[in-house]
């Protein structure tokens, strides 16, 4: 249930099919999850494709929000609160990972030194290690 459809081996597909035969409603949930996962895996799409995907994404979020299952409602609310960021992820590829790396590096320097008494020494250490 947790793997993507395309990562399943033939043996796993058979086991999944028998599981769905024993619990039929799970097949619909699994199919919905697969569609949502494939939608979320889109990256670097153009404006025209984004105009098609955004309404589909919002419809899926609404389906989740008005589901009768509490975990699905929670997921729908979470996706709705992050919808702007998700759409930005589709459209733009830039992240703040470099900034986060520098911040982590500076925190490590500060921890190793147990705090610098002189800011100038700290600044020089950061420039030396991050340059």
Image: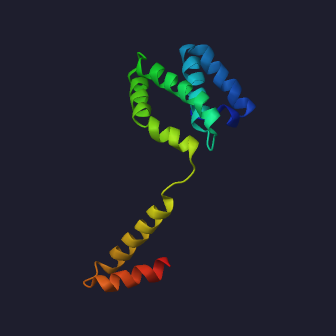
- Rendered residue at 57%/17% (across/down): 28
Give the vertical position of 40 relative to 31 (above or below).
below
Say which quarter of the image contains residue 18. top right
Give the vertical position of 57 relative to 68 (above or below).
below
Residue 34 in sight from this viewpoint: no
Residue 96 appears at what percent x and percent y?
Answer: 48, 57
Q: Is residue 66 left or right of residue 12?
A: left
Residue 41 in sight from this viewpoint: yes
- Rendered residue at 70%/24% (across/down): 14
22 and 98: which one is in front?
A: 98
Q: Is residue 23 left or right of residue 110?
A: right
Residue 63 appears at what percent x and percent y?
Answer: 47, 19
Q: Residue furthest left?
A: 117
Residue 113 appears at what percent x and percent y?
Answer: 33, 80
Instruction: Count up the numbered dots.
Output: 0
66 and 123: which one is in front?
A: 123
Q: Is residue 11 left or right of residue 49?
A: right
- Rendered residue at 57%/41% (across/down): 90
Residue 13 appears at what percent x and percent y?
Answer: 69, 27
Q: Residue furthest right?
A: 10
2 and 97: which one is in front?
A: 97
Snapshot colouring? rainbow
Say which quarter of the image contains residue 33. top right
- Rendered residue at 51%/42% (across/down): 88
């Amino acid at each position: 249930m947790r793997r993507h459809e395309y990562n399943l081996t033939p043996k796993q597909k058979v086991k999944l099919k028998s599981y769905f035969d024993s619990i039929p409603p799970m097949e619909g949930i699994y199919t919905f999850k697969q569609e949502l996962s494939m939608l979320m895996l889109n990256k670097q799409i153009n404006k025209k494709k984004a105009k098609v995907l955004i309404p589909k994404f919002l419809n899926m979020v609404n389906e989740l929000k008005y589901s009768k299952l509490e975990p699905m409602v929670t997921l729908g609310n979470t996706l709705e609160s992050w919808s702007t960021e998700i759409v930005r992820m589709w459209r733009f590829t830039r992240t703040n990972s470099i900034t986060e790396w520098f911040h982590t590096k500076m925190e490590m320097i500060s921890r190793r030194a147990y705090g610098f008494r002189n800011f100038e020494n700290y600044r020089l250490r950061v420039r030396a290690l991050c340059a």
